[in-house]
């Protein structure tokens, strides 16, 4: 009889509308989708109720029952005492009736006060009731301002962090066994995650563009000239000259016939072939002797001429505008070649593979060095007072910058979050957490009211009232 017919269409739940501080209403995101109501994912998150909140709400209901029971008890006692007094039971009935009456007044007054915090008593539009639902947004702004003024101010943050000694504690933790290894493990995992997310094509394009732009904007002629000048002055090029001379002689010995044939091919066609061959052999022998002398004689004139040429070229790279311009054009042409661009772009793949392998291998040199460096840093932070003071100063400056720059954003997060709550849900959440103590106010009001009524009746009777 009391159930709903199976074929009766199910009533669709209307979105709840919560009153804001201006007296208007705004739609609230449905709590769930179990009834077929779609959830607006763009709406701010509402108040969450946990199992602990539900247990607290049950406790509030028990305390409400007790407080209401005391009110009922005071009402029954007042009725019985009044009846007994009218029936001539004696003066004691007046005392009991006065105490019970005052207890009833105190209980009702406190019930009204507690109820007015969360809802309108009996649903009546009494002014200054339902304080939390109607003033929720103002409470959120006040809470945000309170947190900003008392917790996110630069003096408070500096004072608190200064007493903690963050650098020393961090050093003691890093130097403890296993801490540096844990930080290294987490850093390696984070690094692997970042490298896995990055697209190779995007990174290669960025790397190629950055290297090309940097190389194009950097002059290479003058630095190269200074470097070449120092190398020539120190004799650092002589080893290269020795190597070239050795390789040149070995090449001549290995390609004897080729050299003679090339010389012979350049002789006039009217000369006899045996004369051409003799000329080729003569040229080859002179060339071989020259290269051999350059190889064996460190003071050979050709070496001196090469020294002078390299010194002059080094100076031209630094001072001669035409030479500098030619080198820069050659650099630009080299950077523009597809082969060079491909080489620059492919360097990311090699670096990525190297870093990934090092991050995954627990025994890699990279991870060992990071662990050793963290442990060494921890020991220094734990024992070096100067380093502690410097590190704490950095941390205090950073914390002050954060709270000074983002204080408004942090406090607005609090006020906007509270503003996004449904008013009724917020009331239930707050009542679940503080309602039990508020019900003690009702109980205390009943007891204190009864004692006050008894005292007033006693004094009134003593003075002939």
Image (cartoon, rainbow, N blue to C red):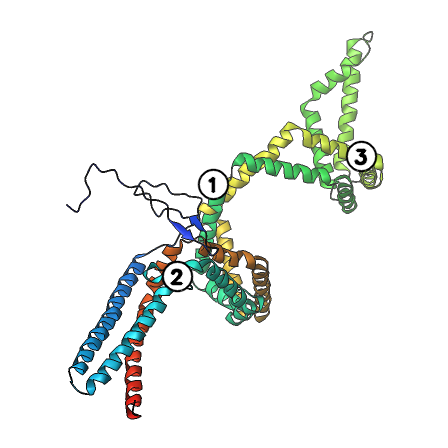
State the mark number for residue 130.
2
Q: Can residue 59 be seen?
A: yes
Q: Residue at x 68, y 32 (%)?
A: 335
Classify mark 1: helix, strand or loop: helix
Of the numbered discs 2 and 1, the one sitting upstream in the chain is 2
Q: Position of residue 7 (x, y in %)?
A: 20, 36
Say the numbered circle drawn on residue 196. 1
In the image, which is nearer the foreground, mark 2 or mark 1? 2
Distance in Å between CA atoms under marks 3 and 1: 43 Å
Question: In this rendering, which labeled residue sits more in front, label 3 or label 2?
Answer: 2
Which quadrant, please, contains the N terminus?
Answer: top left
* Residue at the limit of the structure toward the top, as seen here: 270
Left of 239 or right of it: where is 401?
Answer: left
Where residue 319 appears, x then y in whole percent?
Answer: 84, 41
Specify which label sits upstream in the sequence, 3 or 2.
2
Seen from the viewer's position, the closer of residues 26 and 305 is: 26
Q: What x and y, as percent, mark residue 387?
A: 58, 67
As drawn, 349 above or below 358: above
Q: Is residue 413 left or right of residue 464?
A: right
Q: Secondary structure at mark 2?
A: loop
Q: Which residue is mark 3?
A: 325
Q: What is the spatial separation of the Cα atoms under label 2 and label 1, in whole angstroms?
A: 54 Å
Q: Is residue 205 left or right of residue 29?
A: right
**How far apart are the alpha carbons under marks 3 and 2?**
82 Å
């Amino acid at each position: 009889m009391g159930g709903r017919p199976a074929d009766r269409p199910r009533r669709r739940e209307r979105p709840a509308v919560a009153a804001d501080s201006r007296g208007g209403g705004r739609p609230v995101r449905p709590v769930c989708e179990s009834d077929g109501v779609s959830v607006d994912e763009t709406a701010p998150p509402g108040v969450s109720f946990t199992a602990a909140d539900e247990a607290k709400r049950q406790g509030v209901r028990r305390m409400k029952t007790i407080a209401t029971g005391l009110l009922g008890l005071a009402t029954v006692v007042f009725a019985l005492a009044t009846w007994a007094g009218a029936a001539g039971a004696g003066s004691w009935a007046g005392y009991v009736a006065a105490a019970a009456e005052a207890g009833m007044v105190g209980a009702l007054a406190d019930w009204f006060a507690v109820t007015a915090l969360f809802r309108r008593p009996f649903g009546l539009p009494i002014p200054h009731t339902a304080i939390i639902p109607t003033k929720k947004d103002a409470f959120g702004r006040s809470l945000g301002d309170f947190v900003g003024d008392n917790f996110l101010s630069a003096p408070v943050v500096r004072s608190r962090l200064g007493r903690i000694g963050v650098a020393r504690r961090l050093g003691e933790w890093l130097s403890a066994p296993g801490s540096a290894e844990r930080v290294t493990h987490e850093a390696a995992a984070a690094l692997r995650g970042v490298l896995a997310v990055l697209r190779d094509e995007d990174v290669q394009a960025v790397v190629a563009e950055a290297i090309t732009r940097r190389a194009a904007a950097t002059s290479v002629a003058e630095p190269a000239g200074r470097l070449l000048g120092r190398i020539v002055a120190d004799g650092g090029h002589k080893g290269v000259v020795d190597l070239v001379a050795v390789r040149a002689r070995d090449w001549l010995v290995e390609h004897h016939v080729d050299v003679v044939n090339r010389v012979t091919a350049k002789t006039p066609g009217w000369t006899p072939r045996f004369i051409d061959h003799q000329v080729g052999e003569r040229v080859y022998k002179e060339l071989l002797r020259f290269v051999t002398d350059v190889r064996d004689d460190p003071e050979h004139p050709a070496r001196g001429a090469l020294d002078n040429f390299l010194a002059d070229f080094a100076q031209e790279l630094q001072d001669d505008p035409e030479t500098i311009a030619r080198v820069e054009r050659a650099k630009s042409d080299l950077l523009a070649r597809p082969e060079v661009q491909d080489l620059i772009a492919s360097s990311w793949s090699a670096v990525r593979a190297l870093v990934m392998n090092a991050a995954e291998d627990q025994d890699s040199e990279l991870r060992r060095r990071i662990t050793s460096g963290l442990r060494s840093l921890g020991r220094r932070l734990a024992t070096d007072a100067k380093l502690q003071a410097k590190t704490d100063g950095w941390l205090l400056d950073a914390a002050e910058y954060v709270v000074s720059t983002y204080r408004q954003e942090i406090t607005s997060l609090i006020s906007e979050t509270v503003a996004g709550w449904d008013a009724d849900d917020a009331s239930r959440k707050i009542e679940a957490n503080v309602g039990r103590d508020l019900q003690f106010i009702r109980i205390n009001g009943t007891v204190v009211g009864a004692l006050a009524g008894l005292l007033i009746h006693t004094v009134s009777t003593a003075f002939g009232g």
